Amino acid sequence: MASSFVAAGLVDELVLYLAPSLLGDRARRMIEPPLLEDLGARWRFEFRDVRRVGPDLRLTLAPSGRGG
């Protein structure tokens, strides 16, 4: 469902937490972006805020359009 909101342009910002660990290729994904045919179709974001929360990073991202 989250992917649908991003694809429809209904997301004002994303707040993501990045932990210094790897869960492997079977970890559950937050969003499922479409398979890219070219880089012009990628979802682009800009950093609004980056801060450390304990050992993790908190990233606040805003959409900046598609492509290029």
Image (tube, rainbow, N blue to C red):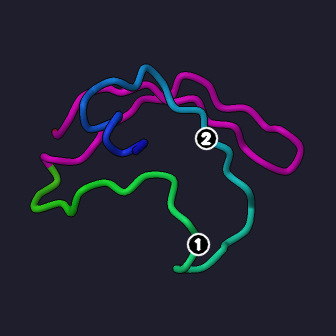
Residue at the spot 17% in from the left edge and 40% down from the top edge: 67
Residue at the spot 74% in from the left edge and 61% down from the top edge: 20
Answer with left or right where residue 51 lies relative to residue 61: right
Residue at the spot 73% in from the left edge and 68% down from the top edge: 21
Residue at the spot 52% in from the left edge and 32% down from the top edge: 14
Please report the bounds of the magenta region as a residue range.
40-67
**Which element type, helix, strand or loop, lies under badge 2?**
strand
The one nearer the camera, 64 or 25, is 25
Mark 2 residue type: Leu
Q: Residue furthest right?
A: 54
Q: Earlier in the sequence, mark 2 or mark 1?
A: 2
- Mark carried by residue 16: 2
2 and 1 marks in contact (CB < 8 Å): no
Q: Position of residue 56 (x, y in %)?
A: 78, 48
Mark 1 residue type: Ala
> Which residue is disc 1 drawn over?
27
Answer with left or right where residue 54 lies relative to residue 32: right
Indicate which label's residue lies in the foreground, 2 or 1: 1
How many residues crowd mark 2 within 10 Å: few (<14), some (14–19), many (20+)?
A: few
Q: Residue furthest bottom?
A: 25
Q: Position of residue 60 (x, y in %)?
A: 58, 29
Q: Is residue 49 above or below residue 16?
A: above
Name the image quarter holding the N terminus. top left
Q: Is residue 51 magenta?
A: yes
The one nearer the camera, 16 or 9, is 9
**Which element type, helix, strand or loop, lies under badge 1?**
loop
Q: In which quadrant of the rendered view does residue 57 lie?
A: top right
Q: Position of residue 30 (x, y in %)?
A: 51, 53
The one nearer the camera, 31 or 57, is 31
How many residues crowd mark 1 within 10 Å: few (<14), some (14–19), many (20+)?
A: few
Q: Is residue 62 magenta?
A: yes
